[in-house]
Image (tube, grey):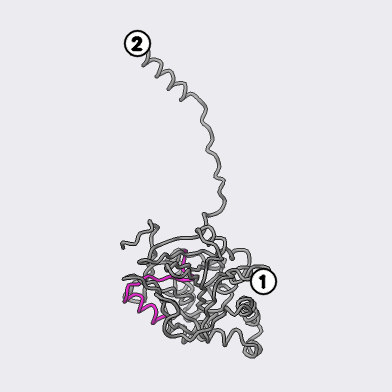
Amino acid sequence: MRLFSLSTALSSAMIALVSLPLQAAAPAQQKTQVPGYYRMALGDFEVTALYDGYVDLPASLLKGIDDKDLQSLLARMFVASEKGVQTAVNAYLINTGDNLVLVDTGAAQCFGPTLGVVQTNLKASGYQPEQVDTVLLTHLHPDHACGLVNADGSPTYPNATVEVPQAEADFWLDEATMAKAPEGMQGMFKMAQQAVAPYAKMNKLKPYKTEGKLLPGVSLVASPGHTPGHTSYLFKSGEQSLLVWGDILHNHAVQFAKPEVVIEFDVDSDEARQSRQRILAEAAKDKRWVAGAHLPFPGLGHVRKEAQGYAWVPTEFSPIRSDR
């Protein structure tokens, strides 16, 4: 009788619960993405990709391809282009154990409201700007260098030495060269000069020749063309290596498949094309990790050789592990 009574009571309770009116699901409160950082191990090094935001670039900036082929390649990768191609801007923070190295710094206030959050994401990742001791610039375009300074002109990374290729400094920081440049480029010269000014004042701006090594575990890989001194950085720890390549390419849907396609921003299109073809061939042959400033975030992955051109193989979201 007791068991029967208990069973009846439980049944009545369940019926009562089922009879209650359903509650509407609470609307999601998060209107933005989670902080834009992604971390992976590279041997004994720690690599953190930092998202700066995006810029919508007109597909027409790509040159050396007819519009039909261009649209076909974009559609093949489901890349919308009607309002411009959404193009990521990424920076990379590498903790070698001896140095905390930031490769490129994002756009800060130079390019509008969709960019400028490298510093925010660096802090979200567990670091502070004051901890960065070295900034390596691939080149001096505003979306790579403007993040060196805060809105008030003070240095974002006050304890860092800023290393920049000598050919970049000779071009972008030279008043005579700026005076001879087309009017549309004048603003880029001024932004580069303003970005490095506080570091030059502190004697922490260090132009270098593109050869050898700057730091233990970091080699220089010359990749000129996009700009006169454009340089990529090869990090190596144990058997693992990562090439942080800067602006070797700007559109993953098009330029992996057709490396001969250039972009209007290139200072020397022929040299940029040659650098891209060489860097892609080496990355595919060596099977090394690569990190791209304008690859879809986090911009980390590998390059695979195809019958024609190359394919981008992005990393998968995974635990931070150093055993593979």
Is residue 65 on the magenta stretch?
Answer: no
110 in relation to 29, above or below:
below
> Magenta region: which residues?
276-297
Left/right placement of residue 202 relative to residue 77 reads right
Q: Residue 89 location in percent, x, y?
A: 52, 68
Q: Residue 71 location in percent, x, y?
A: 47, 71
Q: Residue 156 location in percent, x, y?
A: 60, 68
Residue at the image position 37 percent from the left and 12 percent from the top: 5
Task: Please state which of residues 64 and 167 is positioned toward the viewer in this rendering.
Answer: 167
Nearest to N terminus: mark 1 or mark 2: 2
Q: Which residue is mark 2?
A: 2
Q: Residue 101 location in percent, x, y?
A: 48, 70
Mark 1 or mark 2: which is in front?
A: 1
Q: Is residue 72 visible?
A: no
Q: Which mark is residue 111?
A: none
Left/right placement of residue 184 relative to residue 281 reads right
Q: Which amino acid type is shown beneath numbered disc 1? A: Gly
Q: Secondary structure at mark 2?
A: helix
Q: Secondary structure at mark 1?
A: loop
Q: Which residue is mark 1?
A: 153
